[in-house]
Amino acid sequence: MMVLGILFIMFLSVAAWKSKTLTKSGMIGAMIVGSAIYVGFSWKGILLLGCFFVTSNMWGKIKSKQKYSLHDMVKKHNERDIIQVFANGGVPAFIAMISIFDPSNFIIYTVLFSISLAAANSDTWASEIGTLSKGQPRMLLTCRKVERGTSGAVSLLGTCAALVGSCLIGVIAVLLFDLSIKNLLIICLFGFLGNIIDTILGQTVQVKYICRVCHKVTEKKIHCQQLGRKTSTFSFLDNDAVNVLSIVFSTCLSLLIL
């Protein structure tokens, strides 16, 4: 049964690569993450991971032409590489592996696993749906209006999407693992908190550059064939590192309640 499950995960990963959802390295990363989650949480864990993966890519493809202008601002695009796969799925995979060695606390690990996926889903929904907002978003800490797609910016549409994305993972986790209503609330709350933490880190410590030619703020170090100028001396993390930290922080903070 174990071999069959891993073969199925490999098949899905190859299919995602063929459909240009993942790069070749992303396909390998998905095999590793998926296999680890299957070993820890069996088919139920894969179904919850699949919910994140499918819905995230679905929103990514909706009105993709409208989002095309944002490609000039972000470092990476729709095809996820191995770094992006690990940034979103590495923490859930780690929790899945740890749960094997401590079966007496399986419920706690299940909730932590669900929170880590809820945080990833919340952030992805906020990013993909929030960019469709008609109005300009505002920086969370300063309320200054900025261009859509700017890291650290929020909109009403994106914030609502983040909450729904977290709650979706929470509800499915409760149905799959027969968790309590209290655990549902914890998953929804801390999953959404992961998006808030991501936004704060995105505004404060995520590296952004000002193009010396067109003066656009972008995640790309090279823009208009020129080396950009950092917007802040204290910024040092890229988007993938911010994603990992936001998931880690929100998941660890939940231990205060669990």
Image (cartoon, rainbow, N blue to C red):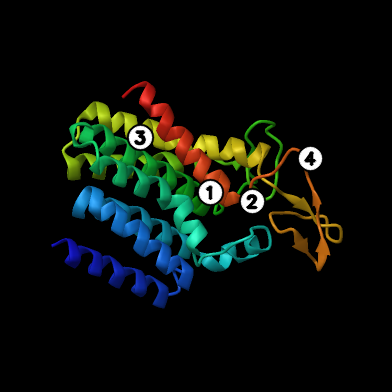
For marks 2 and 1, give the CA distance: 8 Å
Cα–Cα span, label 1 and label 4:
28 Å
Point out residue 240 in the picture as x, y percentages from the top left corner: 55, 51
Q: Nearer the viewer, residue 100 or 89?
A: 100
Labels 2 & 1 near each other (Cβ < 8 A): yes
In the image, residue 244 above or below residue 66: above
SS assignment at label 4: loop
Q: Which mark is residue 11?
A: none
Indicate the position of residue 141 as horizontal and vertical percent values.
65, 31
In depth, the one of 6 and 160 nearer the eye is 6
Residue at the spot 31% in from the left edge and 54% down from the top edge = 36
Q: Amino acid at mark 1?
A: Gly
Q: Which mark is residue 148?
A: 2
- How far is mark 3 from mark 1, CA to CA? 19 Å
Q: Which residue is depicted at the point 24% across and 40% down?
A: 101
Which residue is identified by label 4? 233
x, y percent for residue 113: 32, 41
Q: Is residue 241 above or below residue 110?
A: below
- Residue flagged by tag 3: what amino acid is it? Cys
Q: Which residue is mark 3?
A: 188
Q: Which residue is mark 1?
A: 130
Which amino acid is tagged 2? Arg
- The answer to whether residue 25 of the structure is visible from this angle is yes
Judged left or right of residue 201, residue 225 is right
* Residue 207 as seen in the image, left or right of residue 240: right
Instruction: Of the two numbered discs 2 and 1 on the same chain, state the one appearing first in sequence.
Output: 1
User: Disc 1 or disc 4, which is closer to the eye?
Assistant: 4
